[in-house]
Image (cartoon, rainbow, N blue to C red):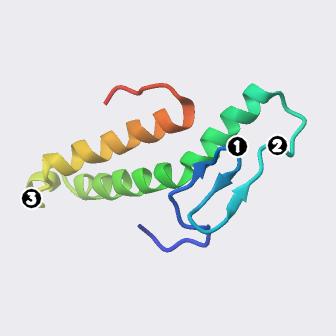
Amino acid sequence: MADTEHTPGPWHRDADGFISSAKETIADPHCSSLDIDEREANAALIAAAPIMLAALIEVNALHHIAATSPCAALEHDLPLDRVKAAWTAVADAIAAATKVNADV
């Protein structure tokens, strides 16, 4: 994954609803006047952010390979399993953020 300044993932919601990394609390969804359902949805989205970023970086890399020429994917031996894995990662990130399964 690309160098970033944010706290490395994975992030998760702990039993108290806080968003945490392996080392520390990232966010406290309780500090809000929003209703509980919206806070929970926001917490799921925040926790899924590192997964989404990794998936987007991979899909972007695959796009750049395939977009360099009409036959770039074949020329670079772009492995189908890598493409499928990237789209599965996107679907998993969507599901983690929204609690809705996305078709791959």
**Tag shown at residue 75:** 3
Task: Determine which residue is flagged by label 1.
Answer: 17
Q: Name the one closer to the observer, 50 or 75.
A: 50
Badge 2 local density, few (<14 within 10 Å), some, or many (20+)? some
Circles 2 and 1 in contact, beta carbons < 8 Å: yes
3 vs 2, front mark: 2
Q: Name the one closer to the observer, 63 or 41.
A: 41
Query: What is the C-alpha distance between the residues marked 2 and 1?
Result: 8 Å
Quadrant in the rendering for residue 78 = bottom left
3 vs 1, front mark: 1
Residue that appears at 50% across and 57% down: 10
- Which of marks 1 and 3 precedes in the sequence? 1
Query: What is the C-alpha distance between the residues marked 3 and 1?
Result: 48 Å
Badge 3 local density, few (<14 within 10 Å), some, or many (20+)? few
Q: Secondary structure at mark 2?
A: loop
Q: Amino acid at mark 1?
A: Gly
Residue that appears at 55% across and 37% down: 97
- Which of marks 1 and 2 precedes in the sequence? 1
Task: Determine which residue is flagged by label 2.
Answer: 30
Circles 3 and 1 in contact, beta carbons < 8 Å: no
Q: Amino acid at mark 2?
A: His
